Amino acid sequence: MTTRSDFTADEWKLLTGVPWAVGLSVILSEDQGRRRATRQEMAALAAAPAQEAAGFTSNPLVQAALPDIVANAAAEQVKEHSSEKGAVEQEIYAQTITLCLRLTELLSAKAPYGEADGYKRFVLAIGRAVADAVADAEFLGIGGGKVSAHERKLLQAVSDALELEDE
């Protein structure tokens, strides 16, 4: 069983910061100046960690990290990542994917496979919850689905970086 004491302070910051980075990147990947949509997505991101953790009650790593993930809502790392509103899509993707790759490497070195796999699925579930928060209007409000093409692309890249096989 993996606990906080198995990680350095910087490693724990990475572990608890990546869920926010993924959620914020989903929001930034599809910013169409829709203030209401962004508010809904931010609300979904605020609620997602606790909601998604309910599906991972048997994963001690998710449960150990949850209080700090929830507390990270006001952390500097989140504010810094969310201030990138003007950044180009590729920069947002690159930063988030780099964080996910670092998380994958960290979990591979420090956590049993089942806990690591569950934690990575938890991170992806947070990104999906944010993407599902607002329907996308592809053309004049017609043909939009819950998840836009940009969001799908980002979530697939996150899944690949987290080495999730059946996603």
Image: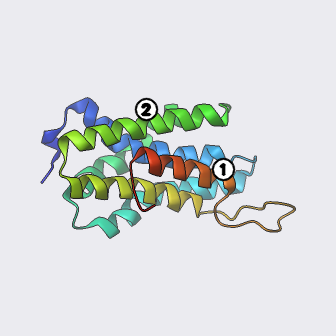
Taking depth in this image into account, of 18 and 111 the one nearest to the observer is 111
Q: Can you say which quadrant of the picture contains the N terminus?
A: bottom left
Closer to the chain start, of discs 1 and 2, is 2
Is residue 93 in sight in this rendering?
yes
- Residue 150's disc is 1
Q: Residue at x 39, y 47 (%)?
A: 162
The way the protein has been coloured in the rendering is: rainbow
Residue 160 to residue 137: above or below: above
On the image, the x and y values in percent for residue 74 come to 43, 41
Q: Residue at x 23, y 32 (%)?
A: 9
Find numbered disc 1 in the image and state the secondary structure of the residue it sits on.
helix
Residue found at the far right of this picture: 140
Whether residue 136 sits left or right of residue 83 in the image: it is: right
Disc 1 packing (10 Å; few <14; some 14–19; many ≥20): some
Mark 1 belongs to which amino acid?
His
Find numbered disc 2 in the image and state the secondary structure of the residue it sits on.
helix
Whether residue 86 sits left or right of residue 123 in the image: it is: right
- Residue 76's disc is 2
Mark 2 belongs to which amino acid?
Glu
**Location of residue 36 by image quarter:** bottom right
On the image, the x and y values in percent for residue 25 come to 55, 43
Taking depth in this image into account, of 97 and 44 the one nearest to the observer is 97
